[in-house]
Amino acid sequence: MTDIKSSKDLVNDHDLLGEKPIDSPRVVELTEAEKVIEKRLVKRIDWLIMPLILTVYLLNWIDRNNYASARLAGLEDDLNLGLTQYQTGLSILFVGYILGQIPSNLLLNWFGRPSLYLGFFTIAWGMVSAFTALVQSFAGIVVCRFILGFVEAPFFPGVLFYLSKWYTKKEMNLRMSIFYSGALIAGAFGNLIAAGILEGLAGVRGLSAWRWLYILEGSVTVVAGIVVCVFLPDFPQTWRALTPEMQHVANRRLALEAAEVDTDEEGVSSQLKGLKLCIADPKVWIFAFIFMGLTGAQGFGYYFPTLTRILGYSHYISLLLVAPPHIFITIWSYVHSIVSDRFTTRYWFCLYPAAVSIIGFVVFMTTNIFGPKYMTFFFMMFLMNINGTLFSWIAGVISRPPAKRAAAYALINSLGNSVSIWTPYTYLDKESPYFFTGIGI
């Protein structure tokens, strides 16, 4: 079997920033024997890593968004929230979320144990979510939501960086879509679960149904965090389930793709250098502004139960009505990513979902008839297909060195989510059932 080239040889075939591979006869493809091993390797990675991170991201989305479900079950009345205090509780999460992103990803790259790092923060946000059941005031919900955002911050950009240490660029779009589908599945089944809890546990042991919602869903997340600590492999070279040949191929295929070994210099200075490279790269800022626009347009997702409630049904039925659009777009997202990979293009697969969603937004603001208005939710959800495609595009364009990639994921995600601080205030109750400001923006 052909041995991997030395780090020195590979770096000599590459520019100093690790971004522009230079043609060289020394950079070769995998051998036929290695390609056979590669297929087995990818299947093994897919069957363990993807189900784990998909499940935890599903729980991440549920714990972040059960605030909207709790609203339908009396959270506002129990906590005596004023006109805009509910919106403040919604937006404050993203203040903590943004503050924790960039330092977290740099720390993850330096720490070198994704299983323990991501698992710890999963346990942390599960505990915060469960303890939210104890709050009795506006101040209490604001504190809990801020802390929840801060401890949730490491997960999403951390997983994006983590996946880039396992998959090649051509494999990333489908895996990003699978990962992001956790949010879509959570939107469907999370609200179905919430409907069951809110309907069946109201008043049990003297607690409001929304308090049970936080207790049960937070507890499940804590268990999931423990599972991540135990079972999530860190990197190919440390995963004992891989044979030495698989470990060799896992590292070699990523190194050949970038024409360099996918490692950083040791020490804190390397992480700071990666941050400087990230800030100096105009592509990072372009993607950040694109993601800001996308996140702002997706703000309706945090109000989905409220938007279905305006159709005139009970809170139980309103939560059930959230599920079909999410189930539909989950299935479509897989088709979307497979076709995108087939054509090996990203631009058009970011453009068409935006066009379809705009049609949904316009119709939503012009009708209040049940059939057409409910169908707009399916059109609006097409925006969700862009997320996985956009981040796989980022993975291909901003690839090496790892410290720069880690900082880029965090910077783009934090700037993108910054718009979620103010978008909750654009959904005005007085504009129901059209919500011209929120949907129009």
Image: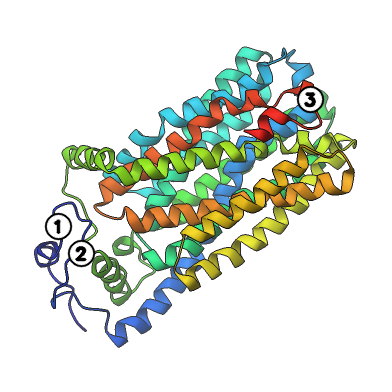
x then y, percent, for residue 217: 66, 39
Tell me the number on the disc at residue 15. Answer: 1
x then y, percent, for residue 171: 43, 67
Which is nearer the N-term, disc 1 or disc 3? 1
Q: Is residue 52 visible?
A: no
What SS does tag 1 mark? loop
Q: Disc 1 to disc 2, how far (Cα)?
A: 7 Å
Q: Circle 1: is it few (<14), some (14-19), or many (20+) Cα within 10 Å?
A: few
Asked which colour scheme the image uses, the reply is rainbow
Residue depicted at x 16% and y 49%: 265
Return the residue nearer the eye: 316 or 438: 438
Which is nearer the N-term, disc 1 or disc 2? 1
Residue 81 sits in quarter: top right
x then y, percent, for residue 239: 35, 63
Residue at numbered disc 3: 207
Q: Amino acid at mark 2?
A: Pro
Q: Disc 1 to disc 3, how far (Cα)?
A: 62 Å
Do the residues bearing badges 2 and 3 touch, measured as CB atoms within 8 Å? no
Residue depicted at x 37% and y 64%: 169
15 vs 291: above or below: below
Residue depicted at x 64% and y 41%: 62
Q: Disc 2 to disc 3, how far (Cα)?
A: 61 Å
Tell me the number on the disc at residue 21. Answer: 2
